Image (spheres, rainbow, N blue to C red):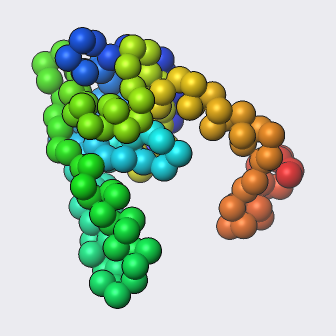
């Protein structure tokens, strides 16, 4: 799984070098799409295929499911690293995530996230201000020596 956060810069053509730590994760290609909280998600092709299978299983009669699929799929774009380990981020996705100049490339379970640094700082601050853990993690925190 990719982890860590790295500041990088977009070049004038909307490309960013992926950190060395993340290159193997997407070496066979990737899909970039809109993410939650205004960031972009970057899935390796294998991860995208698994996600597609789950999304295809959503009932067509579920309005919220249709809306999410529309949001997620309409912004999706396949990409590969170039010879200089850069990925080109489509203009529409850059605009959605307000990416220009410096960006944050962060690891997450099964994906990478690309963030505007101000949005990244706000997202981290929000967690620190109100540290909510999913109920499924509450039992794991004490085992890791952590409490809420």
Which residue is farthest left?
83
In the rendered view of the protein, which quadrant contains the N terminus? top left
* Percent position of residue 56, x then y: 27, 75
In this rendered view, identify the residue nearer to me: 55 or 116: 116
- Judged left or right of residue 132, residue 43 is left
Residue 80 quadrant: top left
The residue at 77%/64% (across/down) is 139
- Judged left or right of residue 60, residue 111 is right
Q: Is residue 88 above or below residue 96?
A: above
Which residue is farthest right?
147
* Percent position of residue 142, x then y: 83, 55
The residue at 48%/42% (across/down) is 38
**Residue 46 visible to the viewer:** no
* Percent position of residue 42, x then y: 34, 42
The residue at 48%/27% (across/down) is 116
The residue at 35%/80% (across/down) is 58
In this rendered view, identify the residue nearer to me: 127 or 74: 74
**Residue 31 visible to the viewer:** yes
* Percent position of residue 63, x then y: 40, 79
Q: Is residue 81 above or below residue 8?
A: below
- Judged left or right of residue 30, residue 98 is right
Q: Is residue 58 above or below residue 122?
A: below
């Amino acid at each position: 799984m990719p982890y860590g956060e790295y500041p990088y810069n977009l070049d004038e053509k909307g490309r960013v070098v992926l950190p060395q730590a993340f290159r193997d994760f997407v070496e066979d290609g990737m899909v970039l799409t809109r993410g939650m909280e205004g960031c972009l998600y970057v899935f390796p092709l294998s991860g995208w295929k698994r996600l597609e299978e789950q999304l295809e299983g959503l009932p067509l009669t579920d309005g919220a499911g249709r809306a999410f699929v529309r949001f997620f799929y309409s912004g999706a774009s396949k990409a590969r690293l170039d010879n200089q380990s850069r990925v080109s981020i489509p203009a529409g996705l850059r605009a959605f995530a307000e990416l220009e100049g410096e960006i944050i490339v962060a690891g997450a379970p099964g994906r990478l996230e690309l963030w505007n640094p101000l949005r990244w700082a706000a997202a981290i601050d929000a967690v620190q201000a109100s540290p909510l853990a999913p109920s499924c993690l509450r039992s794991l925190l004490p085992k890791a020596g952590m409490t809420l």
